Image: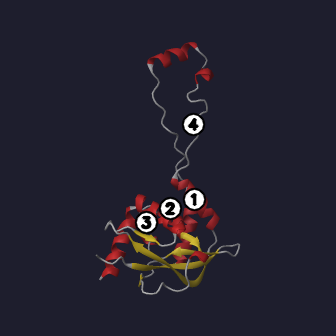
Amino acid sequence: MQRRPRLAVPYHVARLPGGRLVGLDAYFWPSLERRYRVVLLVHPAERLAREPPPGSCRLPSRVAPQRQASEIEAVASLKPRPPRLPRLPRPSLAERLASLLVPGRLLARGGEPAEALPSEELQARGLAKLLKGLEPTGETRWAAFTSDNAGAALLLPEDPSLARIYQALADRDPGYTAAAREAIRSCSR
């Protein structure tokens, strides 16, 4: 049975204007294909270790903390596409004929009108606005990641609160998946 590699991912520590410390993932940051998703790589510093986990393979930092802070500023100023409205089914012939005879407000489908769904970009912009004004501190902290047993090259943090965010990235962003595979390969040698 092949041993699951344990990897130490570096995080640049930065201070928010209110004084709170956050960590910015310094390994996966440049790999994301959708640049607005970098806001998902910012985590409370208290969830990160001051030293790499013992016996882990240390991954290198692949981005400067100043670049990370400026990229957060850029995401905060994005002008995303307007929210998408859900697609409504095409009305049947009977419904179209009824609309000619009965006032429209009495034929409302499903009661309430459909609400607009906020886009992923719009949500990222909102998060980036909360992170504006980051000041790098020069400190590096670490998170332990392990790969899955299935050989699918899924690399997730051991901390469950961080794992669900990286799981979402693994499901949505091919850049993250490619970087995870490369990290596993480099640490399995």
User: Could you say whether the residue bearing mark 3 is in a helix, strand or loop?
Assistant: loop
- Residue 104 screen position, x and y as percent: 59, 21
In-image side of 138 versus 179 (left or right): right
Residue name at image x 44 percent, y 18 percent: 93
User: Could you say whether the residue bearing mark 1 is in a helix, strand or loop?
Assistant: helix
Figure check: 129 above or below 107: below
Q: Which residue is mark 3?
A: 32
Separation (CA) of disc 1 from disc 4: 23 Å
- Check contact, mark 2 vs mark 1: CB within 8 A: yes
| Chain-order first, disc 2 or disc 1 | 2
Mark identifier at residue 71: none
Q: Which residue is mark 1?
A: 125
Separation (CA) of disc 2 from disc 1: 7 Å
Q: Which residue is mark 2?
A: 36
User: Could you say whether the residue bearing mark 2 is in a helix, strand or loop?
Assistant: helix
- Residue 5 screen position, x and y as percent: 37, 78
Separation (CA) of disc 2 from disc 3: 9 Å
Q: Which residue is mark 4?
A: 114
